[in-house]
Image (spheres, rainbow, N blue to C red):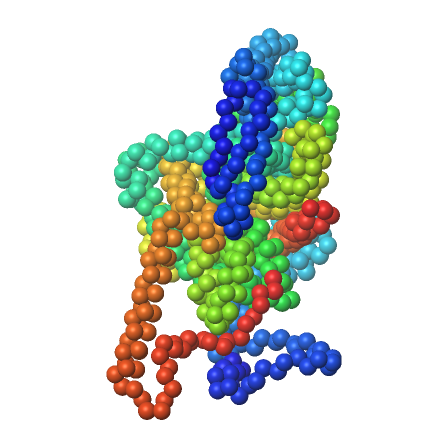
Amino acid sequence: MGTMTDERVASGTVIPSAPIVGEPPPAPRTLRPKAVGADRIFRGIIRLSGIAVLVIMGAVGLFLTFRAWQALSVAGITFLTTQGWNPDAGRGGFGIAAVLVGTVLIGLTAIVIAVPLATGTALYISEYAPRRIQRGLVSLVDLMAAVPSVVYGLWGFFFLQGQITGLSRWIATWFGWIPIFSVDGADPSDPLSGTSPTLYTSSTFICGIVVALMVTPITCSVMREVFSQAPPGEREGAYALGATKWGMVRSVVLPFGKGGMIGGTMLGLGRALGETIAVFMIISFIPAIQNHVLQSGGSSVSSLIALRYGDSTAFGTSALMAAGLALFIMTLIVNFIASSIVARSRSGAGTEA
Amino acid sequence: MTVPIIDLSRGSDIVDVTDSALGDRGGSPTAPAAPLTFVVPAVPVDAPPQRRRSVSNFRRTDTLAIGGSVLAAFALSGLLYDFLPWNGALGFVVVTYVCFLGLYALVVSFDESGPAVRDRTIAVVVQSLAFVLLLALVFVIAYTLIRGWQALLHSNFFVQDMQDAGPLDGLDVGGIFHAVVGTLWMISIALLITIPLGLTCAVFLNEIPGRFTRFVRTIVEAMTALPSIIAGLFVYATFILMLGMPKSGLAAALAISVMMLPIIIRAADVVLRLVPSSLKEASYAMGAGQWRTVWHVTLPTARSGLATAVILGTARGVGETSPVLLTAGFTAALNVNPLTGPMVSLPLETFELVKSPEPNLIARGFGCAAVLMLIVLILFIAARMIGGRGPGNLTNRQRQKRVRQSKRDVERFDARVEASAREAMKLPPAGAPTTSGHIAYAGAGDTFTPNQN
């Protein structure tokens, strides 16, 4: 189409028609861009790459389902309710009840620790820090997200584990009456019981702290981004009404960033649920529901896979795939919710400025 | 224009200034300028010399309040510590911090009102939270580097593999060369896959708007948080179990690619979305097609951002352990062929080494982690140096380069026009219209696709 028009214009055969007064205005032209030549090939190639990426990502889910089918069809609904993991011995003697509870507990512990840290850091960077060091701080937080998980695992296993048992014991002694903080074998009334540190090592709590350090940067960067988008007009309005900095933050920045805070927290949760190697290094795996976060022993889906992938039979592998599928679906749901919340909060809906 | 100089020491004064320069602005220099009248406020003669007001938020009393509270908190918690059911350094720090907060609020409340006290206290809390996080980061990195230092001091650590090093051998035998080679192979193959596929997919997300694109973007965003072990499990299920291939460096590279792909696509997508649409529209208006616009305008404009996206994706991919754990196998020997035989990467080697109770192996593990950490740090610093600028924001050197390029273009055009003019003078074609200086642009008249994102 392009070249023909050019030629006509060049040879002067097309006379631009002036709008004639009195006639109804012509209907708007429908613009339907049509690619020609190199552009058509280009559009074909990039469309193909989009489809390829979609196929790869879809294949992850499809192949896991396909591979897991053998185990799932045997175990049925008991897959969700059985605690033990013994796929090779009998029919249906395996399930993810224990590892699922362990995964969620590690994730929740991590989030409980990460959210205050991330909120504080995000507020500091976006509101309190001098402008000169802001970019440096953002880089440091990003660097924290790039630190390999095995490095966090080393730190957690060799350093934190030895230091934190005192805190674990203190919490168990004073808050042991809350079921989740109780530790079997530790009696608060008897000062001599429960003094052995091995009672508290390799616990869900320690994993949670290490995973918290890994998810804080993600949560923090989402929060910071949303906080810094708070409308300047409303900020200045708050200051003009005599608000202190905290008054402004509380009445403008935090309400504006609420969606981002929730979304960022859930993104962090999604990361925390899938974390493998740091958890695997620290936790001592037990295939039963362990809801005492301070007590030694725990479990997670990813550490189950990392522990058992090598020595399993074909059926055992299929069972592991089923566990992986459960983890995959869980993180996917959390992420979908998170990204939809973040996307909605970024649109700036509900603000006047 | 001349500025009237007024002697301020004379006290209140009314100065008539006839500024002839102001009259010029009317356009007629001959018009009589209106006299201007300035009223100068009275300044007492014996007033002390005025000092510049400090507009900083920082006051000396703030520093004193913080310093005093810290000292008092240490003293108080030292005193309290005998009565409280706590022990250990952590407990002391927590008690001191709580005491500090209380004392600081008390000190501030001596000369401020309620909202200001809350404001100050919360500012301190926010700053200490940020401090704790950054301290943790520095501490994690420093701990790894310091404990790995012992192994890094031996030069054989970098050039030997672990084949000849038994568990009891000292650090002067054996090294992690095989893991470095394995990491390089894996990340190179992964980059070979993810850079072309990831960048074209990011271009797709930006260039062809529509429902399908939105769907792909949603899926990619959800996949950025794909647990890395799932990527490993996927390759294990397809490549190793279904196709029957052995565990190898290639399988590990594929697993890393599956994990890195969404990360790179998402980061590149964000960068490409920031390319000003005025630049693209200018290109379309010049008659360039979509392909030419992407190649000559969009991608060069976003180059630094795209490089950052790739480097940060690489930093993530280099450090992943769990996909490699499932797909690469493990070996103590150097393997330079990624297609056959097991291969080890740095994070996997670290993981396997520290599982041993032997102190020398643990020291090697920390050394390995330190090397990995240094690689990630270098990648990260490179990414920050290349990127961090918005698209279209040039460094000075880039700007100078563009100016030179533009100058060369002008010279080239001039030379061409001159040449064609000389040609036209040399052989005047009979009856033909003169077309001197007309240059046909390739791609002219191609369609314009508005970016509807």
In this view, the residue farthest toward the bottom is B431
Report x, y in % for residue B190. 43, 57
Examine the rendered structure and indicate whether residue A47 appears above or below residue B84: below
Rendered image quadrant of residue B435: bottom left
Residue plotted at (54% across, 42% down)? B33
Residue plotted at (60% across, 10% down)? B76
In this view, the residue farthest toward the left is B426
Q: Is residue A287 at all visible to an observer of this figure?
A: no
- Which is nearer the eye, B251 or B212? B212
Report x, y in % for residue A222. 60, 44
Examine the rendered structure and indicate whether residue B442 appears above or below residue A146: below
Report x, y in % for residue B126. 61, 29
Rendered image quadrant of residue B78: top right
Residue plotted at (54% across, 44% down)? B32
Rendered image quadrant of residue B47: top right
Q: Is residue A8 at all visible to an observer of this figure?
A: yes
Q: How many marks?
A: 0
Residue plotted at (35% across, 47% down)? B180
- Which is nearer the eye, A121 or B67? B67
Report x, y in % for residue B431. 36, 91
Q: Is residue B168 left or right of residue A297?
A: left
- Which is nearer the eye, B275 or B151? B275
Q: In this view, does A30 lie to the left or right of A42?
A: right
- Which is nearer the eye, A40 or B241? A40
